[in-house]
Image (spheres, grey):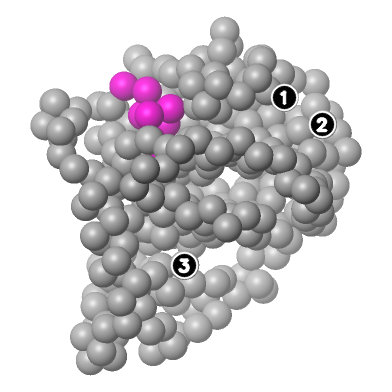
Amino acid sequence: MYYLLFRRFPKSALSRVMGWLADQAWPAWLLRPAIRLYVWFYGIDMSDFALPVAAYSTFTEFFTRPVRPERRPRLDDPAMLASPVDGSVSEAGTIREGRLLQAKGRDYSLEALLGGDPAWRGYENGQFATLYLSPRDYHRIHAPCAGRVTRFRYIPGELWTVGPAGVRGVPDLFARNERVVTFLATEFGEVALVAVGATVVGRIRVVYHALTSNRPGAVTLAEALPEPLPVATGAELGRFELGSTVILLTRPGEAELHPLQNGDPVRLGAPIGRVL
């Protein structure tokens, strides 16, 4: 029903308008109460974050607020994989016959998720974890392990909600929405992080390229970095400007994820897998 109701709704246009509004420096007498209302409604613990409500001049600044480093300690064990985000597990499991589980009774193509990148074959029989970032969560994305960002792929698409209604109701949701895939070369092999855009703002930014998603006339980009970017475990890779989903992919024989169940909370930097 959700899919039928909203398939013709101008989700990308609405998201651009909302993004423009979120970028405006509204007067403090308007912006601060709005942020405080948001904090109260979603139950956000502001003690986790580096700056108080009064420090933000736009809603985008507030939404992408930096976390206090001591509240998310970095994982120093090179034999472990760290959660790249705060959020909760939507689905997790093994990639079989090129398919990932979206929700009970629905799966989708890994090749489509990666925008046709030939690397998809190397992830067959590997594992995935789909991590949902709710409106209350910290919205920056970090490296799950040490390595080098070697290349990325940006795939334009739609901007369906990635909340429960979208996951249950939209076929091929994560391969349909706009997304950025970051490929990280490590000492044990390769991992991929897929940042999936969503309704309302949907912008994705990364630290290694000037890319900004959700632009009119956008085309697919598949680029190798001129100089691979070295990153430590927990280094920032990008951010969402309003909430979405990250999908972590590992290849067979290189790393494996801990058993993760639908709804399990995940915390940035906490161990969620191990190197083989």
Magenta stretch, residue numbers: 171-178
Q: Which residue is mark 2?
A: 189
Circle 1 Cα neighbour tier, 10 Å, few/some/many (<14 / 14–19 / ≥20): many
Circle 3 Cα neighbour tier, 10 Å, few/some/many (<14 / 14–19 / ≥20): some
Instruction: Please provide percent x and percent y for residue 87.
Output: 48, 50
- Sequence-wise, the earlier of marks 3 and 1 is 3
Instruction: Please provide percent x and percent y for residue 265.
Output: 49, 47
Task: Calculate the distance from the C-alpha at mark 1 to the C-alpha at mark 2.
Answer: 8 Å
Q: Nearer the viewer, residue 99 or 27?
A: 27
With respect to residue 232, does 88 lie above or below? above
With respect to residue 202, does 70 lie above or below? below
Q: Nearer the viewer, residue 82 or 210?
A: 210
Tag of residue 251:
1
**Do labels 3 and 2 touch, CB within 8 Å?**
no
Tag of residue 36:
none
Instruction: Please provide percent x and percent y for residue 129.
Output: 56, 33
Which quarter shows the C terminus?
top right
Q: Amino acid at mark 3?
A: Thr
Q: Residue at left 65%, top 19%?
A: 118
Relative to 216, is 191 on the left or the right? right
